[in-house]
Each structure stands twice: as structure tokens, then as C-alpha cells.
């Protein structure tokens, strides 16, 4: 009888733990002072993104860049990249964001679902702190695409900048 | 999904060793890396390095899933049963399954405390993105920080009334996407039901399980659509 009571009490404690409302705090972002700068992706294909002043951004592969406008939001840790998924690179990154190779039908299905939402081609570039480095993710949390901010782009990787306008600043937000 | 095998493995004394080993590696590596650039490189390498899969643990997970999922289907709600069976048998198209806002499956999901907290967290994060006032229309937001993982207490509180969608979805695998239109917040959650998820990969952050590419226990995707009016406090 005693054992039954103990078991019931343990179950009750678990149930209470499960049912109690837990307030989940939003994370602190004190160390993210500006979204401006250069971001590289964690993909094997080298893509990079530059969030520039004057509300323009570049999305680039080693061979070429595409540019578009971004929208400023009220906070200092993000922007909305307009038309991101309508660029060739954005579409390719969307495919990579699922983490592993899928069928063409799968990609199309995911894309069709995105297109049914409002502002389907705009990406909220919401920057978080990844072990001390500002980063933003797309798609799968663990296996998707992540953009990591770099301090010195040239040290990291020397790209073909022939298609980049000459007045583009690539030294981050300094 | 992961709880039953977790309990089994805990009894075997397997998980404590794996979990602590994984954490210690990460901690040591972080201590060593000081420079931002090299840390970025390390994160890139880590993301693309071939994870150490365990054939033995994958086999254990498959066998355990065979039994537990089949048993769960017997007492599961209709949508949960179908979703579990598709995953267990591998008889699915490989395309994401969409659950609309007004579906029974979504009502089951949103009845659970965990998903109510998740929605609350996302709405507050959306409001934070717009500094307290959520636009009536045209807002767009992507979750940055993952919400806490679906834990044992969430599962226990969920199965009191039987097995339904909230018990089989667990932690949401993709970053959530939010928009607003005509005073309504639209939330898109995307989840992957996989063998590694069943084996607690989201909870323990391990990469030991090899997800089958096809056939039984090949991963399935669920797109979960939810909506709610913009709360008064954020208007």
C-alpha cells in the first residue's frame, strides 16, 4: 500500500511539473550592436551576405553577387531582406536550409507553401548570438543554413569581387 | 517521440556517458578558441564534418521504435496514428504534410501547454522585433533562438489524455516563421519526424543516429499552421 502511495506521489509531482506554467524569457542580445557587416554561410558552397549602409544588401556566390534593398526594423539586431528568396542565391540557400539532399518535388512543395504566406520572398534576418559571434539561421535549426558575421572578410576568404560595385564597404560595421 | 527509448537507454547507463562526453568536448573546444575568425571556421567545419554515427545505437533506436510506435498507434488519435504509421512504415511521399489552422490535428497540438508556451514566446519575440507594437499587417519575423526542448514533464502532462499530435511532434525542428495580416498573426512551424529525434537528438544534442534515407523510419516533414489575433497588449 505504501509503495502504491509513493508511486502515485511521484506521478503527481511529474504531472505538476508538466502542467505548471513556465515563463520563458526572451534572450539578451546586448552584444549585437548592429546588423551591418559581412556574413558567411556554413554551407560547403561559399555564399556570403553583406548588409551595407543606405539600406542595401548583397547576396553573393564566388562567381557573382545580387543586390537588393532591406527594411530596417525597430531593433538593432536585425533587418528584413527584401526579395531575398526571389534571387538565385536565395533560392539555392533555401534548398540548402533543409539540411540534406531532398527531391525536387520536396523543394517545390516547400517553396509553394512559402509562397502562400504574406511577403513570401522577404527574409527576416534576425541575428542571434552564436557562441560570441552574431549569426542568423534559415530552415532547420541544427542542420540548416547559418550566416556567421566575420570581422575581416579578406582574412577569411578572398572572393571574386569583380561583380561587386567598387564603392562597397566590406569591413563590417566599423 | 524520444522518451521511451531514453528511459530504456538510461536504464542501460548509456546516455549519461554520451551526454557528458559530448558536453565536455564542446566546452574544451570553446576554451581553446579565442579568435572570432577561427571560431567561425570551427563552426563551419563542425556543421559539415561527417558526424560520428553509431550503427549500434541506430539499430537499437530502430528496434525500439518498431515496438513503441506500433503500440502508440493503437491508442493514438486519428491524425497522430496516421503520422506515426507513415514514419514507421516509410510509406509516404517524402513531401511535407500540411496541417491547417482549423484542423483537428492543430487543435490537439495547441491544447498542450508546451505549444501554448511556444506560441506565447513567439508572439513576444515578434513584438520585441517591432519594439512592442506588432504591425496590423505586413509584419514578417523569423525566430532566432530555438525555444526550449520538449521535455519529460511536457510528455507526461500530455499523455494523461491519450496520445495525440502534441505527444508525437515534440520539439519543433525549424525556425518558426511569423507574419501578420489584417490583425491576425500567422505562425508557420515546420517539424521533422526522424529516427534521431526519436532517439533524443534534440534533447541531448547528439548526432549518433543515422536517419534512413528511404523506407521505414525515413524522415517525414510536418508543416503546422496556426493563427491568432494580435493580443491587445501588442496592438
Image (cartoon, rainbow, N blue to C red):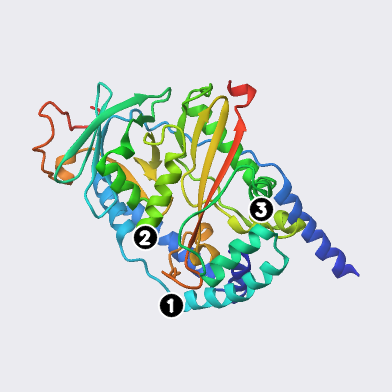
Q: Which residue position holds label 2?
A: A103
- Res B187 visible: yes
Q: Which residue position holds label 1?
A: B55
On the image, which quarter does residue A106 sit in? bottom left
As displayed, is residue B97 above or below residue A167? below
Residue A75, percent across and down? 42, 25
Q: Is residue A63 left or right of residue A127?
A: left
Of mark 1 and mark 3, the one earlier in the sequence is: 1
Density class for disc 2 (Cα within 10 Å; few <14, some 14-19, many ≥20) is few
Question: The residue tagged with tag 1: helix, strand or loop?
Answer: helix
**To which chain does the residue with label 1 belong?**
B
**To which chain does the residue with label 2 belong?**
A
As displayed, is residue B179 above or below residue A158? above
Q: How far separated are the C-alphas under marks 2 and 3? A: 34 Å
What residue is rendered at 37% in x and 32% in y? A32
Q: Are marks 2 and 3 on the same chain?
A: no
What's the mark number on residue B8? none
Amino acid at each position: 500500500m505504501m509503495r502504491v502511495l509513493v508511486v502515485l506521489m511521484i506521478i503527481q509531482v511529474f504531472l505538476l511539473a508538466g502542467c505548471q506554467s513556465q515563463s520563458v524569457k526572451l534572450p539578451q542580445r546586448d552584444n549585437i550592436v548592429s546588423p551591418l557587416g559581412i556574413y558567411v554561410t556554413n554551407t560547403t558552397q561559399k555564399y556570403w551576405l553583406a548588409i551595407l549602409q543606405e539600406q542595401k544588401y548583397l547576396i553573393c556566390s564566388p562567381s557573382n553577387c545580387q543586390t537588393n534593398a532591406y527594411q530596417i526594423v525597430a531593433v538593432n539586431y536585425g533587418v528584413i531582406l527584401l526579395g531575398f528568396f526571389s534571387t538565385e542565391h536565395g533560392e539555392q540557400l533555401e534548398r540548402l536550409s533543409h539540411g540534406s539532399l531532398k527531391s525536387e518535388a520536396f523543394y517545390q512543395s516547400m517553396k509553394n507553401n512559402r509562397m502562400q504566406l504574406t511577403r513570401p520572398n522577404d527574409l527576416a534576418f534576425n541575428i542571434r548570438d552564436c557562441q560570441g559571434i552574431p549569426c542568423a539561421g534559415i530552415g532547420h535549426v541544427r542542420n540548416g543554413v547559418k550566416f556567421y558575421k566575420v570581422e575581416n572578410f579578406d582574412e577569411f576568404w578572398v572572393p571574386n569581387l569583380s561583380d561587386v560595385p567598387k564603392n562597397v564597404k566590406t569591413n563590417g560595421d566599423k | 517521440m524520444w522518451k521511451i527509448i531514453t528511459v530504456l537507454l538510461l536504464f542501460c547507463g548509456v546516455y549519461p556517458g554520451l551526454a557528458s562526453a559530448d558536453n565536455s568536448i564542446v566546452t574544451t573546444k570553446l576554451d581553446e578558441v579565442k579568435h572570432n575568425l577561427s571560431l567561425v571556421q570551427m563552426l563551419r567545419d563542425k556543421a559539415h564534418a561527417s558526424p560520428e554515427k553509431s550503427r549500434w545505437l541506430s539499430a537499437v533506436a530502430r528496434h525500439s521504435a518498431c515496438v513503441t510506435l506500433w503500440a502508440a498507434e493503437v491508442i493514438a488519435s486519428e491524425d497522430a496514428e496516421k503520422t506515426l504509421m507513415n514514419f514507421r512504415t516509410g510509406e509516404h511521399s517524402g513531401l511535407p504534410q500540411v496541417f491547417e489552422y482549423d484542423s483537428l490535428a492543430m487543435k490537439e497540438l495547441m491544447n498542450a501547454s508546451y505549444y501554448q508556451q511556444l506560441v506565447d514566446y513567439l508572439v513576444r519575440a515578434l513584438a520585441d522585433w517591432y519594439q512592442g507594437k506588432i504591425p496590423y499587417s505586413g509584419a514578417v519575423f523569423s525566430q532566432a533562438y530555438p525555444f526550449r526542448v520538449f521535455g519529460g514533464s511536457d510528455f507526461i502532462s500530455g499523455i494523461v489524455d491519450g496520445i495525440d499530435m502534441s505527444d508525437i511532434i515534440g520539439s519543433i525542428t525549424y525556425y518558426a516563421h511569423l507574419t501578420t495580416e489584417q490583425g491576425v498573426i500567422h505562425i508557420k512551424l515546420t517539424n521533422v519526424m526522424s529516427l534521431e529525434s526519436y532517439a533524443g537528438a534534440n534533447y541531448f544534442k547528439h548526432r549518433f543516429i543515422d536517419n534512413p534515407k528511404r523506407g521505414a523510419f525515413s524522415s517525414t516533414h510536418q508543416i503546422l499552421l496556426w493563427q491568432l489575433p494580435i493580443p491587445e497588449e501588442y496592438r
